[in-house]
Image: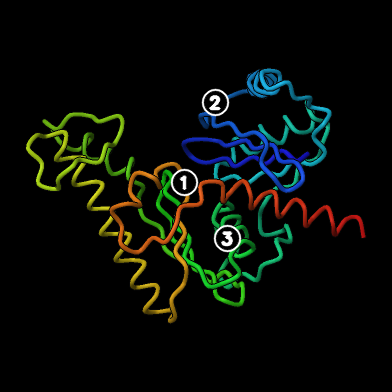
Amino acid sequence: MFLCIDIGNTNTVLGVTRQNKICQQWRIRSEKKLTTDELRGIVSGLFQMEGMSAEAIKIIIISSVVPALTRIFKDLALNYFHITPLIVGHKLDIGMPVQYDNPREIGADRIVNAVSAYTKYLKALVVIDFGTATTFDYISGEGEYQGGAIAPGMMIALDALFQNTSKLPRIEDLVRPEKIIAKNTIDSINSGIIYGYAGLVDGIVRRIKQEAGGNPLVIATGGLAPLICDVCQTIDRIDKDLTIEGLMIIAGSSLAKASK
């Protein structure tokens, strides 16, 4: 059994995999002030709730964009699971050529998504991750990570609208309105964010296709993907487990190489 951990700026996803399948998955908040003891209590509680044993975990792999939490989860792996974790980064062999000026700069989640998507679909791809940021990554038909684009996420835009205006209310959850021409302020904000980001997504994807050539498959992932995909014209499918599956693939590959 593998424990795959994807640490994002807003949420952290933990997935337990067995025989190339996800058998359990949890989402917790990425609390930067969390202590190792507090994290151990959370994780042990999740395992006990599902009747799982920490001793059953043989490999832990971590993808993180929050350095402070990387250290805490590494401590958890060492002190609770007694496992030295794999940390996704430029030093870890991911099995994919990276055509990027400085590979150290790439978010680990972007690389993991690229590996996962190409392993599953074996063709040119655009992967869009709707998280705290909205990221676009292009993978060539030969399986090379070529780079991409980064935009502020929808919730960042929503929060900035509230923080920088005097009369607009804070909206906790985005909801797609039935019509783009809204009749009240809440629906107007939802309309502007959701349909505005649909235009942003379609515009960037079309430019990537024009620059790269061909017709890459466009995959969406991330917590906000289901909210926006139906109003985008360029997204082919949603793959909600892309990142955890990518971590599972990289961990399995590392294990196979170590056993040779």
How busy is the neighbourhood of tag 2: few (under 14 within 10 Å), some, or many (20 plus)?
A: few
2 or 1: mark nearer the eye: 1
| Mark closest to the chain's N terminus, 3 or 2 | 2
Expressed as whole percent of the image width and height from the top left, the position of residue 21 reads 69, 45
26 to 193, vertically: above or below: above
Q: Which residue is mark 1?
A: 222
Does residue 227 sit above or below 26 in this rendering?
below
Horizontally, is 84 left or right of 96 in the view?
Answer: right
Circle 2 residue: 33
Relative depth, front residue between 37 and 46: 46
Closer to us: 93 or 240: 240
In the drawing, does residue 73 fall left or right of residue 235?
right
- Assign a secondary structure to mark 3: helix
Structural distance between the alpha carbons of marks 1 and 3: 13 Å
Along the horizontal axis of the image, is 182 left or right of 8? left
- Residue at the (73%, 57%) spot, across then down: 92
Tag shown at residue 117: 3
